[in-house]
Amino acid sequence: MGRYSIADILLKAAGGNKGWPRVWRDPAPKPEYDVIIVGAGGHGLATAYYLAKEHGIRNVAVLEKGYLGSGNTGRNTTIVRSNYMIDGNTPFYEWSLKLWEGLSHDVNFNVMLSQRGQLNIAHSNAQMDAQRRRGNVMRLHGIEAELLSREEVQEMVPHLDFSPQARFPIYGALLQRRAGTARHDAVAWGLARGADQRGVDIIQHCEVTGFLRQGERIVGVETSRGTIKAPKVGIAVAGNTGHLAAKAGLRLPIESHVLQAFVSEPVKPLLDYVIGWSAAHFYISQSDKGGMVFGGDLDGYNSYAQRGNLPLIEDVASAAKAIMPCVSRLRIVRHWGGVMDMTMDGSPIICKSPIDGLYINGGWCYGGFKATPASGWVFAHTIARDEPHELNASFTLDRFRRGYQIDEKGAGPTPNAH
Amino acid sequence: MLRITCPYCGARDHSEFLYGGDATLVRPEPGCDDMEVWYDFVFLRDNPRGRHREYWQHVQGCRQWLVVERDTLTHEIFSVEPARAPKKAPVLTGVAAK
């Protein structure tokens, strides 16, 4: 498997596009590895990729109960941004965005990063103040941010409701130009290919059913394809972190909730930016195929079901219509649910667990996709060096016990309110 | 739509209810000064994939707090009972009884 290149594409095209090799191997699990990562989603694959690339640890297995990228990696609304305000979050998400900017070249696979800009719309003077404060925090961290007036927003996104009778009048917006979207499947495929080329075994349809212990230490996993040993086991199974951690005897500050996303029938170019709405929880962008991609709040009750319920669909549709009345006649062609690890402060957990040999990457709430590269980067560092990277030093499990929650929204320990 | 059979009002859509979370947690005594106990109560959850006992309040009905046992994977509801044990079982009358 060589590098993809223009020459390669032209050569294969001349040969009728036959002879493309498979993109990653399908190996049987070996009895033992140096590191096992559970979960072949974006985060697990990124972890394996950076373990091999940055730390030279190539004897790695990534175990996946379904098929690669079948969980939340393919269920999000593909938004990538770094407009976070709280200490701990801001530099982490900015590093993630920097990694995104080089990811296609790095993995030699086009993840179709589209830095089209994201606007957080404000609907009152108070919200303008909040956006101004957020923008200032970002700029102090060296992240560009622009506060836009109502007129500037109207010029950029004329289809929002600027009418005098608008239910939520638009006062302005905070713009991050480097934010945008990426093709989520390509992220999983590109990272899988990159990891595989460096020797990582990606083992699909291999469900972890328990942990192998030696004294207190975890030294491997029991799976549907037999026992696999490793001195270090990292779990990157957001949505099911609580379920898997329970098998290791851990209770976590996490509840699993279902979050829905929606896509409309494709239409001609209508929305050039990603829009975040501050009047209620709602976000919308237009995919490269033309579909309007949008989502809102959680359904609100604990759920491991990858499907949502009707009241939330009505809620999200009414939000869409309130901000962009012209979408009211669009048909929703698909909607789906993903299971979120909702933590007690809305921020992730990436750390060594209290059990030796077990490392946790989870608790991504709504925000996992944009964090994919940095999450893998710092998790690989944490596993390889047995200590956190400075960028995930705040994302510990014991921050809740010690009173150092990273509560970006200020919602308190109420997971379904983040 | 989940259909929750309120013991006071009958079967209703879950959109009439407010979700109140894990009902197996036991609130520490107000005077408890053991931070580990509070940490456990405030932050940690069993978060089961399967049967889950949880609070729902019938805010658009009788406003009673209920304990619902529901499967978090299939959403099947096994039982609904008043969160506060009533002195005698509620008797459904009129429309609700049907």
Image: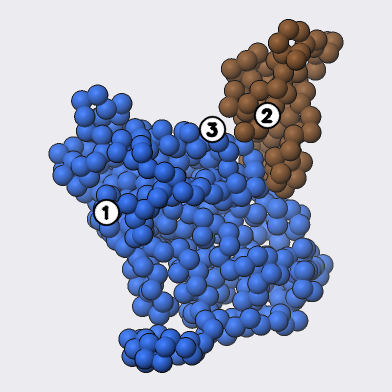
Chain colours: A blue, B brown
Q: Comparing marks 3 and 1, which lies closer to the viewer?
A: 1
Say above or below: A221 vs A161.
below
Residue at the spot of label 2: B3
Which residue is painted at 42% across and 57% down in the image? Answer: A78
What label does residue A311 carry, if any?
Answer: 3
Q: Are marks 1 and 2 on the same chain?
A: no
Q: CA distance from mark 1 to mark 2?
A: 41 Å
As drawn, is B47 to the left or to the right of A95? Answer: right
Observer able to see residue A284: yes
Residue in the picture at 34% in, 60% down: A288
Amino acid, disc 2:
Arg
Q: Residues within 10 Å of mark 2 (few under 14, many from 20)?
A: some
Badge 3 amino acid: Pro
Callout 1 amino acid: Pro
Check the residue under mark 3 and report the chain it is in. Answer: A
Report how far apart the C-alphas of labels 3 and 1 lie in the structure: 29 Å
Residue carrying label 1: A269
